[in-house]
């Protein structure tokens, strides 16, 4: 299997052209302040800054046109290395590269290119705007890629849904010694309960009622314990199945400290049955039962949901579960750490992981935008990523110090398109209020 | 013949850039199919482009190889050296090799490159001369340079100019004889070539443009070279670098269409269905000219090799060849020259030049309306790869034309980052 590599990512929207990255690179690589010699080149003017830098291509043209064998892609790091002792300074690599990623350093007379400073790029930490990031998520692929995929190869999800990603990753991580409960919702709809008499997973899976998922799974787990078998009890439920209909059994199992990992895929509604509202649907959102328009709700005008969402993960904190966390598929490394901790905690007690899961179909956004929507939710503090244990209390894992206005999140999907300025103001107010509310939990836990 | 002929699914003839790219492309899509690479060379794969640096001593001959044996092992490729294609029997899908063996193939790629053209100068067969196309040529010329006092280089193309520079640096008295009005005429205009010629003259070389050799005769120290104007030159080292042409004697009677090269379509397929050709031996679509041409440069070879490999493996991701674009980079006496695109000004097109004679900097940009068709620089650095994309993508530069002319390096990068990042 091929490997994935860490990479330097650039977000032009955040770049203000300050040039700190170029100075850091020139210092690190040439010991001078001559930014023309930097291997990262920010170009452009005013508010439109662009980047020229080596992409460390998977199929590098600079390598294939080098007549001297002086360029090579390192199979372990993915970095395209330049061997000065073989280079003949012919500059053909600069013709091969379509990105300006390898270029002549007129001072040295040789070509120069980014080598990611051996995995510690000098440019990234000096970027005070957050426009440069060193993305190491590839490590997940390299590690997880060899684990067994325990989900059916084909499934019936909507295009662009991130729940497949979630199911495959979670099942791979928890491994084959698992019993899985998937109550009615998108997860069985996508195929966990199977087709034509076979299950959709390579682990035992059952399909409880919406109401009794946690209690059935608790019973199954207890029976395995009685038999002396160490089995992970895993539930993957939707927000409806957890926060509305299934809440009684969920709360009971959490209160009793049943040893299980309960994962909620929160797409903020009953999406597989036609996008009805749930108690996790946010204020103002369009759903099929909180419509938008004149005279569409018992003859009255309606502008989406009129109540605020329930904060289920905070309610789980108040059960003093062994582990509670919120997560997002836009932050896979964070998600992975939390699944690891939750899995570990589920051997001792009740572990709860709440994953915010944008719904392409129900939220009305293009199918290639799922991760972007998920990311914007975090960047605006619309959702917050944190974890809780009774020992260490609550703390943020991806704190957002300088959140974007909530409109940046609202505008990337159709379900909020109708919002009035007053409604937006209400939502922005709620974001601030929620932030302060969770902040207080966090501070108390740290004894402040 | 009762003997069972050895069979291979893919047969690649040649082992330089086009062949190596084809191997990658095939293995990207078909990890299993048997693949055999045969080459007339006795060495591991290397690039003809590196040879001038072997001549100069900058590159050690044992360190110029582009792949090692392990590469072929890992990719499950049978690699056979000193086994060039002798006769192709396209009707029987078999290849008779120079080592006497015969191979049957399902799909064949001809990436046999080119060989030096030896001009029909009276007496040329009576004198010793060098050419530069193989690694053995290069090591031979490298050894000869040390003892040379009076060198004559026939041909002011890239190979000749590179070798001449090395000879100058080795202390020889060097004369370059070029038939055309300027050196490197295919890549640079008169002003740019003038700068290059001046650098050579400054270093002590004699550059005779518009000059032709009409006779060669053996002398006590080497050869006597007679020019069209009657002058004679004494040479103890003679290098013939008057161009290359595909060496395709193996095609004899195979029915594969051949003009200046093996004629291919935009997926590098020849006139025979299961035979492809790529690199310096192929005559393919040209980006600027309506007629197919041999575009014997390294970047074209890699591109064509990849397309041919994808076509052979039936990779659905294949994209048709956009057409060859003239491209080159050239280093001389510490200066650099880059040429991208056509040096011809299209009808209705216009040319911008900037010449800083004092500092030896020259820039020439050719536009067709708002679109770039060629850019040439001496000691004026720009990203050749980005310029190439601006040309083949036919990007309209009308709005930013002045800024582009002012700073093609930076503005080119801006457009790249906005358009195809």
Image: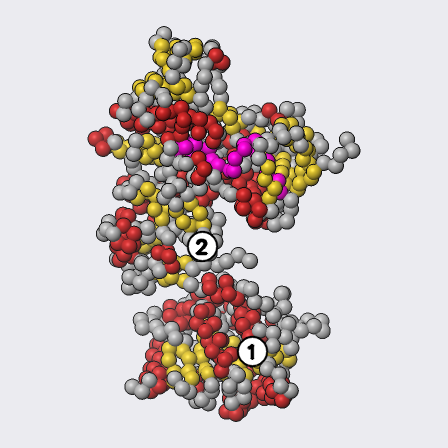
Residue B71: image location, x then y, percent: 54, 46
Quadrant location of the N terminus of chain B? top right
Could you tell me if residue A238 is visible in this image? Answer: yes
The residue furthest top is B230
Could you tell me if residue A291 is visible in this image? Answer: no
Label 1 crowd (10 A; few <14 / some 14-19 / many >=20): many
**Which disc number belongs to residue A289?**
none
Magenta stretch in the rendered image: B35-54
The Cα–Cα distance between marks 2 and 1, rounded to whole angstroms, is: 36 Å
Q: Residue at x 44, y 29 (%)?
A: B139
Is label 2 in a helix, a strand or a loop? loop
**Which disc number belongs to residue A236?**
1
Q: Residue at x 37, y 70 (%)?
A: A379
Q: Which residue is mark 2?
A: A78
Label 2 lies in what chain? A
Residue B129: image location, x then y, percent: 44, 19
């Amino acid at each position: 299997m091929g490997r994935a590599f860490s990479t330097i990512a650039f977000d032009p929207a955040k770049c203000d052209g300050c040039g700190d990255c170029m100075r850091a690179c020139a210092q690190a690589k040439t010991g001078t302040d001559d930014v023309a010699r930097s291997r990262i080149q920010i170009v452009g003017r005013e508010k439109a800054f662009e980047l020229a830098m080596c992409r460390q291509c998977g199929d590098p043209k600079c390598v294939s046109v080098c007549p001297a064998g002086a360029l090579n892609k390192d199979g372990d790091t993915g970095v395209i290395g330049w061997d000065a002792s073989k280079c003949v300074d012919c500059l053909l690599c600069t013709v091969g590269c379509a990105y300006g990623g390898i270029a002549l350093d007129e001072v040295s007379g040789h070509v120069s290119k980014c080598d990611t400073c051996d995995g510690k790029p000098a440019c990234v930490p000096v970027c005070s705007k957050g426009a440069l990031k060193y993305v190491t998520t590839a490590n997940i692929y390299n590690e997880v890629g060899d684990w067994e995929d325990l989900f059916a190869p084909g499934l019936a999800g909507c295009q662009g849904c991130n729940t497949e990603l979630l199911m495959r990753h979670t099942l791979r991580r928890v491994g084959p010694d698992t019993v899985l409960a998937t109550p009615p919702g998108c997860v069985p709809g996508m195929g966990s309960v199977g087709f034509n008499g076979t299950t959709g997973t390579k682990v035992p899976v059952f399909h409880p009622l919406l109401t009794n998922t946690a209690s059935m799974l608790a019973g199954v787990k207890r029976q395995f314990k009685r038999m002396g078998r160490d089995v992970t009890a895993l539930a993957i439920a939707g927000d409806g199945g957890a926060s509305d209909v299934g809440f009684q059994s969920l709360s009971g199992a959490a209160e009793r400290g049943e040893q299980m990992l309960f994962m909620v895929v929160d797409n903020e509604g009953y999406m597989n049955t036609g996008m009805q509202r749930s108690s996790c649907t946010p204020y103002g959102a369009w759903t099929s039962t909180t419509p938008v328009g004149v005279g569409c709700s018992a003859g009255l005008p309606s502008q989406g949901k009129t109540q605020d969402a329930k904060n289920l993960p905070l309610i789980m904190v108040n059960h003093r579960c062994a582990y509670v966390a919120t997560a997002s598929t836009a932050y896979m490394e964070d998600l992975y750490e939390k699944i690891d901790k939750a899995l570990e905690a589920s051997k001792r007690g009740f572990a709860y992981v709440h994953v915010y899961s944008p719904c392409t179909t129900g939220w009305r956004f293009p199918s290639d935008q799922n991760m972007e929507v998920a990311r914007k939710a975090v960047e605006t503090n619309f959702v917050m990523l944190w974890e809780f244990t009774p020992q260490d209390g609550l703390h943020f894992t991806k704190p957002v110090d300088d959140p974007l206005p909530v409109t940046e999140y609202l505008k990337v999907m159709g379900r909020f398109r109708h919002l009035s300025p007053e409604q937006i103001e209400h939502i922005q107010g709620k974001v601030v209020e929620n932030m302060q509310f969770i902040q207080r939990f966090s501070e108390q836990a740290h004894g402040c | 013949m009762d003997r069972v002929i050895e069979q291979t699914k893919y047969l690649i003839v040649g082992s330089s850039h086009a062949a190596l790219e084809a191997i990658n492309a095939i293995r990207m899509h078909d990890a299993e199919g048997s693949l055999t690479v045969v080459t007339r060379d006795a060495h591991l794969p290397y690039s003809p482009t590196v040879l001038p640096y072997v001549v100069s001593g900058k590159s050690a001959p044992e360190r110029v190889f582009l792949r090692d044996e392990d590469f072929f092992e890992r990719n499950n490729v049978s690699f056979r050296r000193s086994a060039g294609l002798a006769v192709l029997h396209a009707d029987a899908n078999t290849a008779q090799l120079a080592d006497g063996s015969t191979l049957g193939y399902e799909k064949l790629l001809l990436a046999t490159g080119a060989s030096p053209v030896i001009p029909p100068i009276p007496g040329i067969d009576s004198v010793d001369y060098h050419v530069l196309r193989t690694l053995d040529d290069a090591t031979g010329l490298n050894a000869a340079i040390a003892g040379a006092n009076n060198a004559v280089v026939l041909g002011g193309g890239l190979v000749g100019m590179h070798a001449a520079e090395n000879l100058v640096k080795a202390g020889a008295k060097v004369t370059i004889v070029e038939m055309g009005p300027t050196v490197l005429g295919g890549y640079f205009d008169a002003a740019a070539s003038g700068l290059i010629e001046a650098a050579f003259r400054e270093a002590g070389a004699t550059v005779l443009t518009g000059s032709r050799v009409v006779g060669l005769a053996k002398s006590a120290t080497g050869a006597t070279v007679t020019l069209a104007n009657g002058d004679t030159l004494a040479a103890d080292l003679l290098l013939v670098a008057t161009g290359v042409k595909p060496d395709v004697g193996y095609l004899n009677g195979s029915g594969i269409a051949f003009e200046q090269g093996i004629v291919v379509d935009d997926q590098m397929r020849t006139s025979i269905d299961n035979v492809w050709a790529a690199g310096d031996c192929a005559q393919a679509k040209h980006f600027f000219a309506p007629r197919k041409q041999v575009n014997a440069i390294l970047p074209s070879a890699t591109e064509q090799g990849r397309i041919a490999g994808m076509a052979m493996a039936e990779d659905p991701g294949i994209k048709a060849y956009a057409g060859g674009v003239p491209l080159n980079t050239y280093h001389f006496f510490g200066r650099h020259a880059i040429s991208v695109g056509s040096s011809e000004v299209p009808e209705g097109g216009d040319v911008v030049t900037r010449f800083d004679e004092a500092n030896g900097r020259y820039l020439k940009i050719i536009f067709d309306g708002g679109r770039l068709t060629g850019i040439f620089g001496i000691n004026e650095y720009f990203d050749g790869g980005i310029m190439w994309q601006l040309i083949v993508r036919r990007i309209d530069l009308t709005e930013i034309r002045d800024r582009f002319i002012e700073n093609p390096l930076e503005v080119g990068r801006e457009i790249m980052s906005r358009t195809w990042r």
